[in-house]
Each structure stands twice: as C-alpha cells, then as structure tokens.
Image (tube, rainbow, N blue to C red):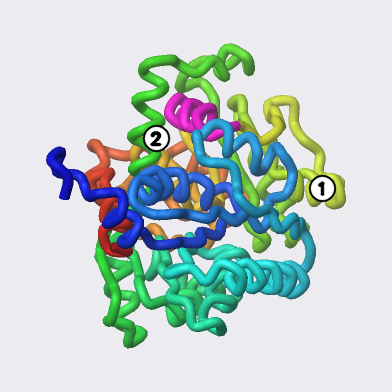
Amino acid sequence: MTDSGRPSEILGEKNRMKVVSVVGARPQFIKAAAVSRVLRERHREILVHTGQHYDYEMSGIFFDGLQLPKPDINLGVGSGSHGAQTGAMLKGVEEVLANERPDYLLIYGDTNSTLAGALAASKLGIRVAHVEAGLRSFNRTMPEEINRVVADHLSALLLCPSDVAMRNLAAEGITEGTHLVGDVMLDVMNWARQRLCEKPAEILNRLGVVKHEYLLATVHRSENTDNPEKLSEIISAFNSLQERVIFPVHPRTRKMIADARARIGENVRMIDPVGYLDMVALTGSARIVLTDSGGLQKEACWLHVPCVTLRQETEWVETVAAGWNRIVGTVCEKIVEAVRTFVPTGLPPSLYGDGFAAQRCVDLLD
C-alpha cells in the first residue's frame, strides 16, 4: 500500500480483472450505466453493443443521456427473427471472448443479447455474471422467459433484485452463487432524479403537456406487437381515453401499427423514443403510465405514479402487491376501465433495495 492508503500501481494492475459486458437493448443500457461507473474504477471493462436496438434513436440517444461510455465493440446485428438475431450475436460475442479471454462475462436482463452472451461464454469456459437474475413470469411462450431461464442456469454469479427472485432460483435448484443485491435501475433512477433537480427537463414544454394532465404509454413486447388483434385492442383503448396520451414508439412497434392499419386517435401523440432523463421526466409527471415494459413498471412505482400493465402477468410482482401496478391484459374495455378507476391508496413501499446495487455487484465480482 502507498502512504495514501491506495494500492500501488503494480498491485492495482495485478488485481485488475478484465470484464466483457454485453448490452443490446434500452433497459440494458440503463443497468450498465450504473454498473460501469463502479466497475471501471477497479477493473478493465470492454463494453460490447450487439446492435439489437440498432438505430440512434434506440441506442445512441440512451448512451448520450446516461453518460455511459461508448461501446468498445458494436456487432451491428440489427433486427431479425429470434433465431437469426441470436445466432449472429452468438457468433460475434464468441469472437470477442476468444480474443479477449476475460475473467467474467457480464450480462443483463432477458434479451436475445443476454442469451447469446451466456451461451458463448459458457462454451468457452468463461464465468458468467447475470445482473437481474431470478425473474420469472412463468410464461414460457415469452421469448424473454426462455432467455432468462437459460441465462440463469449458465451463470456462475447470479445477482438478484429481490427476495422473490432468490426464491425462484432456489425452486429451480440454483443456490450456488446467488446473491440479493437490489435493482441497479434504482441506482440510475436516483442519479436521474438528482440531475433533474439540478436541471429540470424541458420535454413537457416541448410536447405542450401539463404535469398530471396526460397519460404515458409504451408498447414493445413481441407478444403484443406481433399479434395484430392485441395491438389493435391496445390502440383502440388509447383512442377511447378522454385524455392526452403521449406514446414514445419503438421503431418496430411503429411498423407493426402501420402494418395493422390501426387508426391513431387525435388524443394520442406518437413521438420518437426519447433519452433516459426525458423518459424519467415524462414518467414522473404523468397521471398514469400504461406499459408492457418491466422497467417502466418499477420506475412508475419509484416515482409514485400508478401503472397499468398491458400484459397477463409480470415479473415485478412486488409492484402489484404494493397496490401501484394493475395487470389488465390487452382487452380495450379493461384498459379503459383501469385508467378511469385505478387510484392507489397510500405511498408505495421501498422496493428493490437502497440504490447501491451496482456497488454490491462489483464487490461480488471482486
């Protein structure tokens, strides 16, 4: 040790690990923003962007807003069928890992990028650390469910956001390497709140909306976008609401809406995807959030905004138990009724940790 109490450069280099982190979709950018800040203080990180969300609106704007380092490698895979996309990612990630030989591969969540990373690393004998391990919807028709189950069973280090996630893993016989760390998205949410206090977002003015006088909607899961009947029901519900609906639209969702020839009502404003800080501002100022996104269910709860979930189940069951998230599915009448009547009672409890999950994740990597 040096006189300052810091490790010497030689000792520091000796103890530095090499970690390859794989991201490819918006929620993963958010999670990686929290972990990378801590990880790079101690170790060498190589950030690989698979290109699953491949255009600037879906990736670059998030990197900018989150102050996340630019990817060291961009595989540029783009969209495609699940098999084609995952196969291309598997090939690309395998090449990176074979060249770099990291101590760990770090994966996030439940996307095809997550699955490809877990498969590539496990076949090369590289340890896998999974941030947001243990989530289950118990719906095997969801591609995300298959991805997260396989990734968990291939991981050496399972970093769980909740007690429920820990119990889910134990029920599947996974007890080695499991740790309750909390949710890294809460780390980023706390950072974003501070940023917005210092410099309030201007997006409400740009969109001409008033706090608590609009609804915020997002739709992106394939179970909704790839089913014309479900998608039409959701859009009909939005059109039937007697309130302004701000609808940031994923490019793929926009295409599916056009293919379904769904009419968009005058009360619904479709906008391009926005950066993370703007999305937090829109969420926190909405009267209600309507979404099929897991991340937005939590963020709404943290921001004390009621959430109506456009699915038949959720992995984030704690938000439902807290009374701030209502699962309604995709039937138009049920969505409209929920928006009209849903009023949570009392403040939501503290969920998913204390905002220091990233620190725990890196401590466990050490």
* Disc 1 crowd, CA 10 A, few/some/many (<14, 14-19, 20+): few
Q: Is residue 321 left or right of residue 75?
A: left
The structure residue drawn at horizontal position 48% and vertical position 60%, both measured from the top left corner, is 108
Count the numbered circles shown.
Answer: 2
In this rendering, which labeled residue sits more in front, label 2 or label 1?
Answer: 1
Q: Is the magenta stretch mostly helix, strand or loop?
A: helix
Instruction: Mark 2 or mark 1: name the one nearer the start of the chain.
Output: 1
The structure residue drawn at horizontal position 46% and vertical position 22%, both measured from the top left corner, is 212
Amino acid of disc 1: Lys
What is the secondary structure assignment of the residue under circle 1? Answer: helix
**Residue 27 in view here:** yes
The image's mark for residue 305 is 2
Q: Which of the two residues, 129 or 140, is positioned nearer the viewer here?
A: 129
Residue furthest to the bottom in view is: 173
The structure residue drawn at horizontal position 70% and vertical position 37%, both measured from the top left corner, is 57
Residue 342: within the magenta? no
Residue 283: within the magenta? yes
Q: Which of the two residues, 226 or 308, is positioned nearer the viewer here?
A: 226
Residue 91 spot, x, y in % from top left:
70, 73
Q: In this view, does 207 lie to the left or right of 118?
A: right
Q: In this view, does 139 lie above or below 264?
A: below
Residue 42 spot, x, y in % from top left:
33, 51
Q: In this view, does 77 lie to the left or right of 36?
A: right
Which residue is label 1 attached to? 255
Q: In this view, does 306 lie to the left or right of 248?
A: left
The structure residue drawn at horizontal position 62% and vertical position 14%, both measured from the top left corner, is 206
Amino acid of disc 2: Val
Residue 365 spot, x, y in % from top left:
32, 64
Stretch of the chain drawn in magenta: 275-287
Q: Which of the two residues, 217 or 100, is positioned nearer the viewer here?
A: 100
Q: In this view, does 217 lie above or below 113?
A: above
